[in-house]
Image (cartoon, helix red, strand yellow):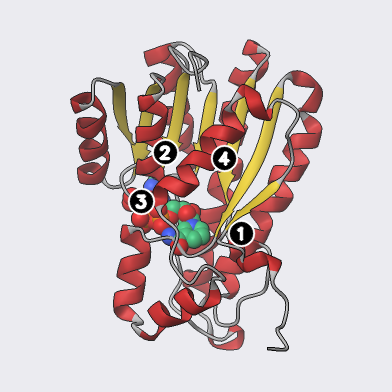
């Protein structure tokens, strides 16, 4: 990607594992300074160790993205450390145990909505003022294929991911003339720590996820990271407000008559 990321500042939430770690590493390989944040200290510190070992520059800031004061402190610390935020990958999220809508529990609902959806709004609430000061910035939010379709037994997860797309498009329109682009990625099934743990508890899902994809395989975290970097890059300078599926063709299919 040339020199465009060199010396720029990328913030990644949920950077201690999976898609977030792959994106943090990808930003670092392009020589951006990377602020890795995660609720999990071990994973976050491991990511910055990997970045530093590869010759990159990174700091870790422990953050629970569902907590307003922690998100505010994260953004302040990132700016204090590197002076600006050029790219924000708001990615931290959790799944939900399968349950029918009417059987679901209010506290589980609240936890998924605050961790997956309110968190993205909180991140943008504090990232955007800094980007407005700079007159530039690119934000990528992690939604999901579950943000494009209803998914039986995943009401809170699917709702949170649909909500992220509403938020992404709204912010994209609000700040389109201010030099800030806001997009979302919608991954299909990706082989991450989070997904592996989920499939370990529900083993029947492994074959289901593979079958669902026209490519008949899981995606890799690096395949999502590549799209995130492209969305942040100058090559995407006219791209804002999109929900980009990265799913091996899953969202292209309707029903089959084969
Ligand atoms: N893996 C998939 O198949 C898939 C598919 C579609 C969307 N997604 C989305 O991609 C994102 C990343 O998922 P992943 O598969 O890499 O998961 P993962 O579990 O491997 O990594 C997620 C990271 O987020 C962190 N995290 C969780 N709650 C947090 C909180 N409250 N505050 C800060 N950090 C927190 C975790 O500690 C973990 O390090 C999520 O938003 C997820 O919903 C994943």
**Left/right of residue 68 with respect to residue 61 in the rendered view:** right
Q: x, y (%) of residue 202?
A: 36, 82
Residue that label 1 marks: 161
Does dot 4 land on a helix, a strand or a loop?
helix
Query: Disc 3 versus disc 2: distance between alpha carbons?
Result: 9 Å
Q: Quadrant of residue 62?
A: top left
Does dot 3 land on a helix, a strand or a loop?
helix
Query: Disc 2 versus disc 4: distance between alpha carbons?
Result: 20 Å
Name the mark on residue 18: 3
Point 69% across, 44% down: residue: 168
Tag in front: 3 or 4: 3
Does dot 1 land on a helix, a strand or a loop?
helix
Tag in front: 1 or 3: 3
Residue that label 2 marks: 23
Q: Residues within 10 Å of mark 3 (few under 14, many from 20)?
A: many
Query: Disc 1 versus disc 3: distance between alpha carbons?
Result: 18 Å
- Residue contact between numbered discs 1 and 3, judged by CB atoms under 8 Å: no
Does dot 2 land on a helix, a strand or a loop?
helix
Query: Disc 1 versus disc 4: distance between alpha carbons?
Result: 15 Å
**Left/right of residue 116 with respect to residue 63 in the rendered view:** right
Q: Mark 4 or mark 2, which is nearer the start of the sequence?
A: 2
Point 57% across, 34% down: residue: 230
Name the mark on residue 170: none
Q: Mark 2 or mark 1, which is nearer the start of the sequence?
A: 2
Point 68% across, 50% down: residue: 243
**Is ligand 1 less than 8 Å from the beta carbon at label 1?**
yes
């Amino acid at each position: 990607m040339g020199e465009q990321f060199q010396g720029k500042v990328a913030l990644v939430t949920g950077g201690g594992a999976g898609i977030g770690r792959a994106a943090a590493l990808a930003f670092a390989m392009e020589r951006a300074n990377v602020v890795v944040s995660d609720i999990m200290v071990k994973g976050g510190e491991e990511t910055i160790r990997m970045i530093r070992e590869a010759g990159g520059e990174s700091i870790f800031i422990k953050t629970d993205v569902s907590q307003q004061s922690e998100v505010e402190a994260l953004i302040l610390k990132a700016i204090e450390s590197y002076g600006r935020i050029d790219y924000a990958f708001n990615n931290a999220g959790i799944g939900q145990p399968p349950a029918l809508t009417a059987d679901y529990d209010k506290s589980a609902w609240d936890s998924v909505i605050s961790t997956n959806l309110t968190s993205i709004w909180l991140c943008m609430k504090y990232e955007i003022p800094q980007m407005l000061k700079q007159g530039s910035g690119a934000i990528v939010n992690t939604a999901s294929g579950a943000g494009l379709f209803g998914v039986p037994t995943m009401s809170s997860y699917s709702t949170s991911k649909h909500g992220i797309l509403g938020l992404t498009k709204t912010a994209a329109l609000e700040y389109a003339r201010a030099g800030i682009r806001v997009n979302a990625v919608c991954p299909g099934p990706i082989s991450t720590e989070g997904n592996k743990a989920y499939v370990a508890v529900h083993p029947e899902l492994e074959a289901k996820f593979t079958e669902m994809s026209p490519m008949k395989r899981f995606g890799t975290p690096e395949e999502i990271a590549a799209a995130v970097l492209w969305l942040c890059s100058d090559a995407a300078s006219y791209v804002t407000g999109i929900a980009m599926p990265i799913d091996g063709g899953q969202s292209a299919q309707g029903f089959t008559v084969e």
